Image (cartoon, rainbow, N blue to C red):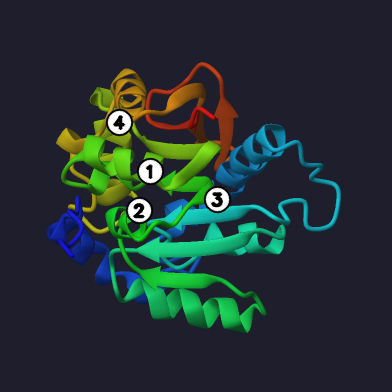
Amino acid sequence: MQAAQTTIDPAEVAKFEAMAAEWWDPNGKFKPLHMLNPCRLDYITSQIAVEFDRDLQTDAPFSGLRILDIGCGGGLLSEPMARLGADVVGADAAARNIPVAQVHAQQSGLDIDYRHSSAEALAEAGERFDVVLNMEVVEHVSDPLAYLSACQALLKPGGLHLCSTINRNAKSFAMAIVGAEYVMRWLPKGTHEWSKFITPEELYRLLEQSGLSPVDRKGFVFNPVAWSWSLSARDLSVNYVTASVKPA
């Protein structure tokens, strides 16, 4: 059998391998994600609830749903999905992230299927999911269209794809690179490459080309005064998220 093609960028993987042990330190190198996570989860849970007619006020509202968290890192999104009752697979190209995620899930009493794998390998193996969480990954791959096509293949007909990334403009360079990496030192220098950032219009085109139908997009906006993140229907200038469905 021919090996699955991959869009994994070894240099990008190496960056996150070096930070693996810090995933669950809220004041470590992943502090920006810990700060953003409540806002991300608000969007993710509401989109899944609407798409699959689930009541978030009930116990285990995502019971019966199979969710893939691609680029799962240490499990910052996988664990909340499991707590909501979903059957969760967390996959990451960085091998060192997987034991970190596994140990934390065990300590939290959660049953999550973590794998050192890629979207392409999972798709070739015939894996299928109701939801694919694709958060802050597409700006780190070598071929965004091929990668998104693999994510589309991983969805069941009628499935939901949630994808967040960073816009490409002067503001995003100032905030996501200069601010986060050089001024605040939230992230190691070189974590992001501005040229790999993707505008919302570009991402919509890529999603459509991959066979998905975009249905929503929102901005994640940081307020430096309140020191918190919020969702915005208008401001997609730096961080943003999209929702797409696979035609039934």
Circle count = 4
Marked residue nearer the N-terminal end (1 or 4)? 1
**Mark 2 burial class by Cα count in 10 Å: few <14, some 14-19, many 20+:** some
The answer to which image quadrant residue 45 occupies is: top right
* Residue highlighted by disc 2: 123
For the question of whether residue 227 can be seen, the reply is: yes
Amino acid at circle 4 = Ser
Q: Secondary structure at mark 3?
A: helix
Instruction: Please state which amino acid type lies under the numbered disc 3.
Output: Asn
Give the image location of residue 48, x and y in percent. 64, 40
Q: Which mark is residue 153?
A: 1
User: Which of the marked residues, 3 or 4, is nearer the chain's N terminus?
Assistant: 3
Tell me the crowding category of disc 1: few under 14, some 14 to 19, or many 20 or more residues within 10 angstroms, Cα based: many
Q: Amino acid at mark 1?
A: Ala
- Please determine whether, in this image, residue 136 is positioned above or below residue 89: above
Q: Is residue 48 left or right of residue 234?
A: right
Mark 1 element type: helix
**Is residue 63 rendered to the left or right of residue 131?**
right
Q: Position of residue 112 (x, y in %)?
A: 56, 71
Q: Quadrant of the C terminus?
A: top right
Contact (Cβ within 8 Å) of mark 3 with mark 4: no
Q: Can you tell which of label 3 and label 1 is closer to the viewer? A: 1
